[in-house]
Image (spheres, rainbow, N blue to C red):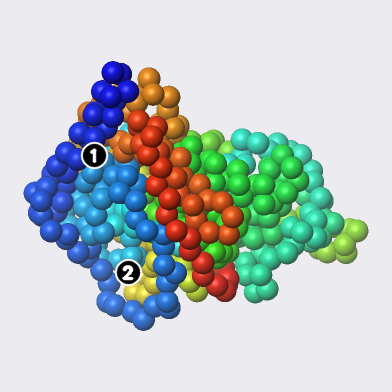
Amino acid sequence: MRAALLVATASAVLLAPAPVTAATGTSAAPTVRCPSAPAVSRPPRPSPPPAVPEQRVVGGAGLATSGLVVPPATEAPPAVSATSWLVADLDTGQVLGGCGPHEYGTPASVQKLLLAATMLPRLDPKQTVTVTAADMNIEPGSSAVGLVEGGRYSIETIWLGLLLNSGNEAANALARLGSGADDAAAGVRAMNEQAHRLGALQTHAVTPSGLDGKGQFTSAYDLALIARACFAEPTFRRYALTEQAQIPVQPAQRTKGFEIQNENQLIYRYPGALGGKTGFTDLARHTYVGAAQRDGRRLVVTLLGAESAPKRGWEQGAALLDWGFTVPRDAAVGRLVEPGELTATPSAVPSALAAPRPAAASGPMHSTGSGWLWSVTALSGAGVLLVGGLLWRNRRRLS
């Protein structure tokens, strides 16, 4: 009887009319197109896995749109070239608005935030480690901080190389070291487990760095969940606001020490900036995550698929943050689910579904083999949906 009541409750939540969150102020309104910058020519994008309805309502039914979702009677958000974006409150978890928040996108280097959310608690920043040949196996021409094979570095130095200069060799090293198996592939599996725990059901990592890989996707909503986990870590907040760091000399490799600088211009040019992460590949285009505080509020912005003209990714993020700070504190179109909420035990499900905190009735999602095998478990524990595989080729340059 209890199981039947839970299933009925979940069905009512999933099938209930969407909350009044569209720009038109009506729940049955057609999709509202997002304000966008002038159209640009884009390279072909990989086809994402088929959409699963339960994933699209994580955080609230109002977020299940490919178009614009903002609170009624708020200012229109600025036009940006990003194909999808989201603005949320880091502290309350309220989603203030977005454009296609659950649309699939390619992450590029903002995927390094998932690596940070997974591995920061596992690694001692004071430990000194040795970089291996496997760590240095990155795509020619892709971003690197300048670590050398056989070099000895503190974990903290490698984190700074990852977050300031987007070093792909640093990503490989941290995934390997934090895996518990001295294996970067095991580190990627841990990243996917962490994404699932955070409720980022549309995120699947293939590489630790964000270098393009078969079946690698995320969404603006998922990135906000991941960023929120990162900014909850004091160590991450310190790294994200670090402007310069020193990479030490390596006498055995006859390499000199050098200084690196934070590539995220938000921390230099935006009052109240908290940091974030930039990303770019030819496939993903520009991706960005940034956060800032103002008048006692901390907001995060995530965007995918942006072009650098007429505004660079961080500038588009800054414009959306400015807009977010104009949204009243009590206005929201959804919320960020809490870590572990979507994998809670049955006894915890009613609180997860209780108003005013609507959550999707979705469960584990994972991949196996060379394709995608998404399993979405209903609250009854009975239904499993298998969705076909996705393959695409050619990794592209990452910066």
Q: Position of residue 86 (x, y in %)?
A: 32, 52
Numbered circle sitting on residue 14 = 1
Task: Name the front one of labels 1 and 2.
Answer: 1
Q: Amino acid at mark 2?
A: Ser
The image quadrant that residue 180 belongs to is top right
Q: Amino acid at mark 1?
A: Leu
User: In screen coordinates, is 242 left or right of 123?
Assistant: left
Numbered circle sitting on residue 81 = 2
Q: Residue at x 28, y 18 (%)?
A: 1
Q: Residue at x 34, y 51 (%)?
A: 52
Q: Quadrant of the C terminus?
A: bottom right
Q: Position of residue 49 (x, y in %)?
A: 41, 59
**Could you tell which of marks 1 and 2 lies nearer the N-terminus?**
1
Q: Position of residue 275 (x, y in %)?
A: 48, 50
User: In screen coordinates, is 271 left or right of 175?
Assistant: left
Q: Residue at x 23, y 63 (%)?
A: 34
SS class, disc 2: loop
- 397 or 267, which lies in front? 397
- 387 or 161, which lies in front? 387
Circle 2 Cα neighbour tier, 10 Å, few/some/many (<14 / 14–19 / ≥20): many
Q: Residue at x 28, y 29 (%)?
A: 7
